[in-house]
Amino acid sequence: MSLTVLMNAGPWLSVPPPGYGGIENVIATLVPELRRLGVRVVLATVGSSTLPVDDRMSVFGDGQFAALQRPYNQVCGIAQAHLAGVVRELHSRDDIDLVHDHVEAVGLATLAAMGPSGPPTLHTLHWDLAKHPALYGSLDGGDRVRVNGVSASQLARAPLALREHSVGHVHLSTPLAVDATGEPGRRRASTC
């Protein structure tokens, strides 16, 4: 029986990304290696993602990145809607051995809030930890939620509560995923 990982890419860009998409590029590079090693991967992403995986789930048909230009009160529910879909998926399955989450703040908060009934979770910290001091300073993932950093210096500056949940760091140095152009994604003007 092989390990099954739900890889949470989030609702912002397809995987692989059409141009530069940092997290989506990391995932597009990591997933083929996991699958090569025999790990089954369920990708939580947007419907336009084309990365070969064993299964996928999505709430949105296409990436929601362009919405980030709009006022907070018009976009604050996008990541939460995606995470609600992830939680529904986790509740409907019994084959997920691990969640590897890449969704800033709301991913970590939502998966930690699942409590002991949720699957083991690894949350990768891709960003400046000073952005969310209230969350990171009070994290309680119990024995189920762990974090990994992208550098030793990032974790050295992390609040104690976050460091206590750390499994260490993996230096973030990833080549562009197959078929990624290296060009920035085109931004669309907001229609609101």
Image (cartoon, rainbow, N blue to C red):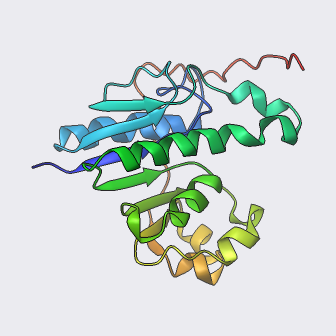
Q: Farthest residue toward the left?
A: 1
In the image, taking residue 111 as reference, residue 72 lies left or right, namely right
Residue drawn 54% across the image and 30% down it: 59
Q: Is residue 168 visible?
A: no
Q: Is residue 7 visible?
A: yes
In the image, taking residue 25 as reference, residue 33 lies left or right, namely left
Q: Is residue 28 shown above or below 103?
A: above
Q: Nearer the viewer, residue 186 or 82?
A: 82
In the image, taking residue 186 as reference, residue 43 lies left or right, namely left
Q: Residue 117's spot in the image, x, y percent? A: 39, 65
Q: Residue 19's spot in the image, x, y percent? A: 58, 22
Residue drawn 59% across the image and 34% down it: 11
Q: Is residue 65 shown above or below 171?
A: above
Q: Please give the count of numbered marks on the rendered protein.
A: 0
Q: Residue 58's spot in the image, x, y percent? A: 49, 30
Quarter residue 143 falls in: bottom left
Quarter of the rendering occupied by the C terminus? top right
